[in-house]
């Protein structure tokens, strides 16, 4: 079983970090041997999420979305399950946030 876990932001945000851990726990409860690919905007903040969990860089740079994230999106049909957590909400409090929101909605 291959699982894609999307919209993971950063473990430095306690709420996002908890959502990721709880999502992984729920996936493991349902599918104990699942291989989980986590797409996080700040992958370096997530440490040791357990066996079979790979954290991919889902962040954006001034040049656009990261390669790991684009590669993962192109392969979504290869996953048996796609799960989204709450770190992927849209916001536009500042011009840069509005631009990122506009770019990611496509």
Image (cartoon, rainbow, N blue to C red):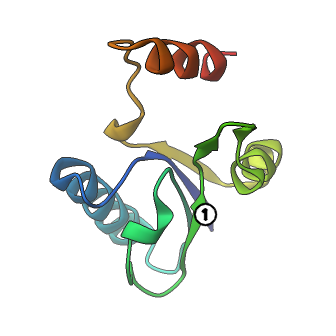
Residue 96: image location, x then y, percent? 49, 20
* Closer-to-camera residue (24/41): 41
Q: How many marks?
A: 1
Residue 76: image location, x then y, percent? 74, 46
The residue located at (56%, 15%) in the rendering is 99
Residue 87: image location, x then y, percent? 35, 39
The residue located at (73%, 52%) in the rendering is 72
For the C terminus, the image quarter is: top right
Residue 23: image location, x then y, percent? 33, 56
* Closer-to-camera residue (84/103): 103
**Quadrant position of residue 86:** top left
Q: Is residue 106 left or right of residue 44?
A: right
Q: Is residue 31 left or right of residue 20?
A: right
The residue located at (26%, 52%) in the rendering is 19
Q: Residues within 10 Å of mark 1 (few under 14, many from 20)?
A: many
**Image: 82 above or below 18:** above
**Image: 102 above or below 38:** above
**Quadrant position of residue 77:** top right
* Mark 1: secondary structure: strand
Residue ID for mark 1 = 56
For the N terminus, the image quarter is: bottom right
**Image: 89 above or below 66:** above
**Quadrant position of residue 88:** top left
The residue furthest left is 14
The residue located at (26%, 58%) in the rendering is 17
């Amino acid at each position: 079983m291959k699982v894609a876990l999307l919209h993971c932001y950063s473990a430095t945000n306690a709420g996002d970090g908890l959502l990721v851990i709880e999502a992984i726990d729920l996936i493991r409860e349902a599918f104990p041997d699942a291989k989980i690919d986590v797409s996080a905007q700040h992958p370096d903040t997530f440490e040791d999420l357990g066996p079979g969990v790979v954290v991919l860089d889902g962040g954006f740079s001034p040049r656009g979305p990261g390669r790991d994230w684009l590669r993962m999106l192109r392969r979504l049909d290869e996953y048996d399950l796609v799960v989204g957590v709450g770190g992927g909400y849209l916001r536009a409090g500042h011009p840069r946030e509005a631009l990122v929101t506009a770019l990611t909605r496509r």
